Amino acid sequence: MPRPGEAGAQARLAVSTVIFALSPDAGAAAPSLRIPLVRRLREPGAGRWALPGGWLPVDEGLDEAAGRTLNETTGLAPTYLEQLYTFGAPDRSPDERVVSVVYWALVHSDEVERAVSDENVCWFDEDDLPELAFDHLEILEYALWRLRTKLQYSRIAHALLGETFTMAELRGVHEAVLRTRLDPANFRRTMEASGTLVDTGQRLAGTPHRPPALYRFDTASARGGDPIHHPTRTRNAS
Amino acid sequence: MPRPGEAGAQARLAVSTVIFALSPDAGAAAPSLRIPLVRRLREPGAGRWALPGGWLPVDEGLDEAAGRTLNETTGLAPTYLEQLYTFGAPDRSPDERVVSVVYWALVHSDEVERAVSDENVCWFDEDDLPELAFDHLEILEYALWRLRTKLQYSRIAHALLGETFTMAELRGVHEAVLRTRLDPANFRRTMEASGTLVDTGQRLAGTPHRPPALYRFDTASARGGDPIHHPTRTRNAS
DNA sequence: CAGCTTACAGTCATCCTGACCTGAACGCGA
DNA sequence: TCGCGTTCAGGTCAGGATGACTGTAAGCTG
């Protein structure tokens, strides 16, 4: 923060968010990752799809701006929100210089139901993306990499599920994100050893086989994940 | 990147860097981490110490701006440079809104010799920091956490050493950063198994004991560390 | 040469993880 | 009603990684 003064030409500051959710066909075979995108109505890049976001107001924090713009454009309230990276190549946007502070978010699967979805806001499957505006494809791939990496050392899969979930559902999240098959027995063992799951005592009835136990995420033991300060976790917009 | 136009009040964009190096007393017992800071000459925060940095020019990339301001203020050419986080709380700077894209860098120990060091640029020991301006202490602690975390799963310790180094020197870096004692035999085993070290065949003579082998970092096997794209590694300023 | 230091190699127990096996608990169709 | 399918849930076993530790090699110093 050096000398102030001399206004001059400056880069504009934007905030965008990569949002992840699971496909609603939870009962079906394998869920897949889905990302909501908004259609650009103005130049530059009009007609193409882009990440939800907006300009940063002078008096609003970065985290708050990410949560707000995310909610305004998609109607979603994420359960997990974290800063991803700041993209600022001089030529990433034509006409003017734009620096984007990008966040990534996870939303509950039942939240998706309530989400806005018109002709200008649309959900896309992870491997069925449209042509994106600017460098948003690069951003999205980086967010995907971060999600996959972080899932392996942190316990964030529950943020894509509801309040309670079965062990098979939780494993389905891991399989969908990591794109692998996981051994059910070994997965159960490691998750139980992590100490982040609480057995609710309830069981999910109505299955054509033995009823599975319902678990809940232990928010108390969720401490010490990653960014020690400014974690910003769990907000409730709308 | 939404609608342009309407100039209005905007946050100012700054770029700062947390620089890490080892104390030059390499021959002595345990090296320690040192950080160069610059004294602020103007308000706000005049007299206090701050991270090297500067305003972001409209036509310069973030990585380039970080490397340039770092070099201009300290005279250093880092061997490792990576984006850390973007800090943008509305009240982090009085008077005006400032958003800082912060980087962190590692420099070779022999680079420190060439570094500028006057009354306005001074090196501080990790646990002997002065009172810092703004939220720079929080930033520095977050950078320290990131350095410690990343050292354990990535091979970046060599960036704090010279071209060649002994196993004991490399272990000294880990011990200084992680603030622990490491078993020499086990450390050697894991480092050799990582496949990132190359034995130069030379040995360091002049020691009062058995001469140790000199190793070199294998840049070829350094692939696939972390941010898949825009890695920005290894620049050469000045 | 004795004695000090560190370099370097090897052993052993423990933990973690992937592969696999077995019984339990439901719904379903014959 | 009674197998028979499914998944759930708990267990065993082998291999790899890691920490604690021991032993030998190779330099210097007194």
Image (cartoon, coloured by chain):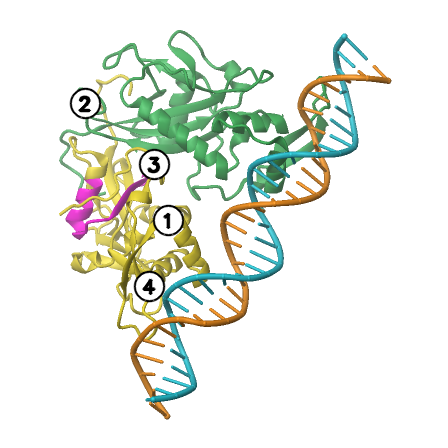
Chain colours: A yellow, B green, C orange, D cyan
Q: Which is closer to the viewer, label 3 or label 1?
A: 1
Sort mark 2 into few (<14), some (14-19) or many (20+) by Cα contacts within 10 Å.
some
Q: Residue at x 58, y 28 (%)?
A: B170
Q: CA distance from mark 2 to mark 1?
A: 45 Å
Q: Amino acid at mark 1?
A: Gly
Q: Quadrant of residue A65?
A: top left
Q: CA distance from mark 4 to mark 3?
A: 29 Å
Task: Say what secondary structure mark 2 lies in.
Answer: loop
Q: Amino acid at mark 2?
A: Glu
The answer for which chain carries disc 3 is A
Q: Amino acid at mark 3?
A: Pro
- Could you say which disc has been placed on residue A195 in the image? 1
Q: Which is closer to the viewer, label 2 or label 1?
A: 1
- Could you say which disc has been placed on residue B96 in the image? 2
> Residue B17, image x and y in percent?
38, 25
Q: Residue at x 24, y 40 (%)?
A: A15
Instruction: Indicate which disc, 1 or 4, sits on the residue closer to the N terminus.
Output: 4
The answer for which chain carries disc 2 is B
> Residue A161, image x and y in percent?
28, 56
> Residue A120, image x and y in percent?
18, 56
Work out whether residue A229 can be spotted.
Answer: yes
